[in-house]
Image (tube, grey):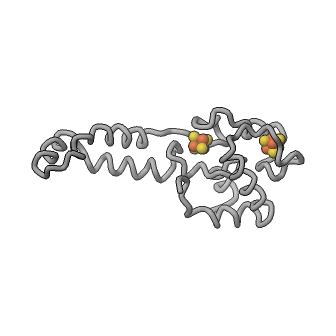
């Protein structure tokens, strides 16, 4: 994976867009589509399985399908291409563009007090950027690329 591709996956705050459920080219979307296709019209059979198997969980299949369909239809182009659809208060994308930096650790104000991130994300933002500063963006991405977005 070259640097340009890494930038597409990694937002300026250091969080991975490619593992976000909302990312249009993400694994969660891809696998949800596959599962949705494979299940076909399972909703027409779920009630029967609830009775035959005495498993009431099949009765809530319509809720599962709603969630699966939502995952399958997500279309966020990632933080470098459009405003984050999940973190409405985040200022990092716009601010990093104004500052002319690809990542916050490259900014002379880092760590500033106007990222707009909540406490939890603020901690991740600082530690991710310190790590990128220490080992470089490429090594950082390769180190985290197999980790879960929702650990
Ligand atoms: S910009 Fe926000 S919503 Fe879009 S993929 Fe990245 S983290 Fe997810
Ligand atoms: S001012 Fe803060 S949010 Fe903006 S680029 Fe610098 S460190 Fe990031």
Q: Is residue 93 above or below residue 139?
A: above
Percent of width and height locating residue 1 = 62, 62
Q: Quadrant of ligand 1?
A: top right
* Residue at image coords 64%, 66%: 143
Along the line of sight, which residue is nearer the eye, 46 or 101? 46
Percent coordinates x, y for residue 7 in the rendering? 68, 52
Q: Residue at x 53, y 53 (%)?
A: 150
Q: Quadrant of residue 96?
A: top right
Figure quadrant of residue 84: top right
Query: Is 37 in front, or is 64?
Result: 64
Q: Position of residue 110 (x, y in %)?
A: 84, 48
In the rendered image, the vertical position of residue 79 relative to residue 15, given as above or below: above
Q: Nearer the viewer, residue 3 or 56?
A: 56
Please tell me which residue is depicted at 30% across the width and 47% down the height of the picture: 37
Q: Is residue 132 left or right of residue 144?
A: right
Q: Nearer the viewer, residue 39 or 49?
A: 49
């Amino acid at each position: 994976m070259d640097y340009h591709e890494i930038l597409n996956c990694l937002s300026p705050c250091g969080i991975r867009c490619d593992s976000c459920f909302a990312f249009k080219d993400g694994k969660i979307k891809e696998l949800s589509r596959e599962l949705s296709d494979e299940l076909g019209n399972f909703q027409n059979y779920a009630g029967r399985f609830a009775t035959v198997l005495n498993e009431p969980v099949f009765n809530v299949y319509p809720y599962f399908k709603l969630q699966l369909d939502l995952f399958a239809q997500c279309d966020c182009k990632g933080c470098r291409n459009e405003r984050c659809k999940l973190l409405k208060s985040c200022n990092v994308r716009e601010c990093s563009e104004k500052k002319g930096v690809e990542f916050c650790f490259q900014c002379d104000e880092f760590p500033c007090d106007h990222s707009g991130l909540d406490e939890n994300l603020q901690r991740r933002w600082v530690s991710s950027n310190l790590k990128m500063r220490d080992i470089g963006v490429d090594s950082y991405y390769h180190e985290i690329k197999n980790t879960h977005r929702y650990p």
